[in-house]
Amino acid sequence: MSAPLHRDGDVLVQLNEHLRIVFNRLQWILQVRQGRESQNDTGWRGDSYCCYRSTLLRCIGERCEDVDAAALRLVEAFPEVHPRIERLRRDCRS
């Protein structure tokens, strides 16, 4: 079994100062910055939980915020299905 490329909570893409995508073992999470960082709180909140790249891109578009073009290209290069979900699909077919 190979080591995962990302750990839960790893920031994959910072879209702008208010939006970012973090890795979770089951999905990608679009997070929104709400409030300020404090000793006990990062200020980031999960907004959308996506297993499919197309859904993630739709959720980003629905936020109607300026997103860094280079960051958006990174998201567009994600696999269409989150790696864990794709692995589960393969295992079910076997």
Image: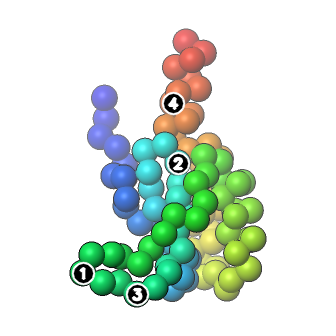
- Secondary structure found at label 3: loop
Task: Judge depth for marks 2 and 1 and give the one in front.
Answer: 1
Label pair 1/4, CB-CB below 8 angstroms: no
Q: Quadrant of the N terminus?
A: top left
- The residue lying at 30 percent from left, 84 percent from top is 38
Q: CA distance from mark 4 to mark 3?
A: 37 Å
Pick whichever, 30 or 11, lies toward us. 30
Q: Residue furthest top?
A: 94
Residue 63 in percent (x, y) is at 70, 75
Look at the image and tell me whether residue 17 can be seen. Answer: yes
Q: Which residue is mark 4?
A: 87
Q: Which residue is mark 3?
A: 36
Amino acid type at image mark 2: Gln
Task: Judge depth for marks 4 and 3 and give the one in front.
Answer: 3
Residue 92 in percent (x, y) is at 57, 17
Q: CA distance from mark 3 to mark 1?
A: 10 Å
- Secondary structure found at label 1: loop
Label pair 4/3, CB-CB below 8 angstroms: no
**Disc ID at residue 27:** 2
> Quick one: label 4 or label 3, which is nearer the N terminus?
3
Amino acid type at image mark 1: Gln
Task: Judge depth for marks 2 and 4 and give the one in front.
Answer: 2
- The residue lying at 41 percent from left, 78 percent from top is 43
